[in-house]
Image (cartoon, rainbow, N blue to C red):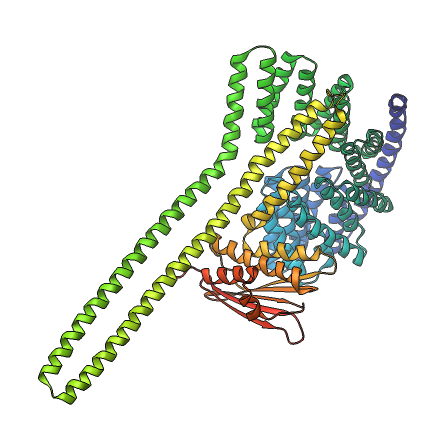
Amino acid sequence: MRQIGCFIQPFILLIVFNLVTQHYSKAQDVSQTTYIKIIELEDDTNKVLQLLGLSKKYRSNDTDTALNLASLAQNLSDQIGYDKGKAEALYQKSVIFKNSGQLDSAIYFTNYSSKIFKQIGFKTGIANNSNLYGSILRRQGLLSAALESHKESLNKFTQFKDSIGLAKTYNYIGIVYNDLAIYDSAVVYYLKLIRISEKIDFINGYVSGLLNTGQVYFELGEYDKAKYYLKKSIKANESINSKKNIALAFNKLGLVEFFQEREDSAYYYFDQALFKYEEINLTSGLGWVNLNIANILAQNEDFANALSKYSLSKVYFEQIGLMTGILKANINIAVIYEKQGEYRNAIAQYDTCLRIAHEIGGKDELLFIYNNIYKTYRQIGNETKALNYLDKYISLKDSIFNLEKTAIISDLELKYEKEKNEAEILALNLENVQKDLKIKKESNRKNMFMAAGGLFFLVALFLFLYFRQLIKKNKQLAKQKLLKAAEKQKLSSAQALLEGQEEERIRISKELHDGVGVLLSTANLYLSTVAGEAIKNKELVAKAQQIVNDANIDVRKISRNLMPTVLALNGLNEALQDLMENIDLLPDKYGEFHVTGNSKPLSKPREVMVYRMVQELISNTMKHANAESVDLELDYQEKNLQITYLDDGIGFDFEKELLKKSLGLKSIRSRVDSLKGTIDFSNGIENGVQYVIRIPITEED
């Protein structure tokens, strides 16, 4: 049936192409007529808006015409002094350049339009520009900066309650989190997008949220949830006839079925995706679908057809200059040559892959290529070149895995030296206090005897009593100094212990992510390579692959728990925001997070300890309080950070729990003491519990 379909499909596509061409010609005529009508209008703001609307229609299929129309709108706005129209025209140019991949020009026009929007105080334009700039930064791979730009838009749209703007921004933020592989945060923002879009009947936001949520669940390996959202997105997209999104959903459904080893269903969805992409003539989509089909053929050892499909996908990618797609197609072609024993062709293909990987800076791809070239040269008996590429593989792997480890070791060494110096200074201070006490004692005795010999008995008695009291007071002062010094040393040791624990968490997290995670991915790659060859043990290999995938997911979760990525990338405020958003994912649980005052940076160890305190408070609430909502506020004062934590649970006796030596409360109080802060506790008026924690923003001397 599939072979018959291959012969029939070109005939059907020819008919579709003719229909689309006729429709496009009619659309061109309509647009031309519309353009003539617009040109005949009086030169006013309405004419500017009409030109911008027509430019937007041309944006997806005729870049030059779209730019010309935007330029006409810009020039007319200059003539009539319509600043908002000029800014909108510049914004339109930035979008056109971004879509065509001319990112430098896109950034120029974004900054230009943003300047005008700020001058005229047009808040919506400023917020939209922040989102556009974030989207450009994401295209450049600057994900942290992109996230920051989108968060600025989110704050602005929240202030003036623009629901459409909020929906679009939720989508942008979810995409960046997905690229950062912070999938839980991505799901949170995609679900927010779906909810707000349903509420305001924003169909474009609704279908984007469904499609992107399906993608995240696919990345997490939760295939049933992925299929649920992808199929739901197809129905929603059919209502607005969005063929591009329908094709994308079909392609992703094909991948889900492929990973669940349902090849017939996978082929069906890939065929549907191809048909939709051919209808709209989207070259990149055709390239990715053909690449996915080739992967199935290669796994089934149908190498001839797999090579044909990989070559076809490469042609599509070359048409649009998509280097990542070209590299993936070339790597797979080289692997097939290697499996067929055509080692010379494989090496030639790998050489091409090396050049492209160096151009785009693909380190993971370089590792894979070096390893495969090494194995290929071993197959043909060229041990010299095999060892050469093995050295390159090991060198690159070491540079990737050891770079951050070296930095961690250096930080630990510096911390050790700092703590060692502080301990020496503390010991010296204790010695000086003892010497001062001894000197004062000797001085007081001399004074007492001199006074007793020269004065009357009453005066002598009075002086004796006076100096005895003075000695007692000095002893108390000295004792207090000693106790204070000992307490300071105790706090310093506790702080060093806590910071050491956090350093160890970071080290283990990175080891898991960079070491074990990569090894599991490599094991999965090798299992995939031998899956087709081990026919007798295919079921066992499949089970092994599933176990490796499950282990890889668990390693990522453990790594994120040990040291949350968002804390390392974006700091305390964003990390606590992420922590509170995770509460929203729990059934019938709500989390609110507020920041007041001007945010001030804390040192990384202090940020980590504050984060762990809040994490412990939330854990106590979820385990024991039977609470529905949690409210967290950070108040940045001049010198202190005040943390107010409130839940609506059943409350408890704080002092009684401390007497029980509760580990959670003991951990919180220990961290507060280590930070030289204070903690106040109270039960709510009706129920619940409230903590008020104050810590210095900077470390005290």
Which of the 4 image quarters holds residue 55?
top right
Q: Is residue 483 above or below residue 460?
A: above
Please say whether residue 284 is visible from this viewpoint.
yes
Which residue occupies the extreme left position in the image? 454
Left or right relative to 19: residue 176: left
Residue 526 in picture, x, y percent from top left: 65, 26
Left or right relative to 658: residue 245: right
Please say whether residue 125 is visible from this viewpoint.
no
Left or right relative to 421: residue 345: right
Q: Is residue 119 above or below residue 367?
A: below
Which of the 4 image quarters holds residue 100?
top right
Which residue occupies the extreme top position in the image? 381
Q: Is residue 304 above or below residue 649?
A: above
Residue 109 in picture, x, y percent from top left: 61, 46
Residue 121 in picture, x, y percent from top left: 62, 61
Q: How many marks?
A: 0
Residue 198 in picture, x, y percent from top left: 80, 55
Query: Which residue is drawn at the image coordinates 51% and 23% (left, top)?
Result: 392
Q: Is residue 656 above or below residue 468?
A: above
Query: Which residue is drawn at the image coordinates 67% and 57% (left, top)?
Result: 583
Which of the 4 image quarters holds residue 596?
bottom right
Which is nearer the eye, 275 or 554? 554
Which is nearer the eye, 150 or 686? 686
Q: Quadrant of the N terminus?
A: top right
Left or right relative to 434: residue 692: right
Which is nearer the eye, 236 or 81? 236
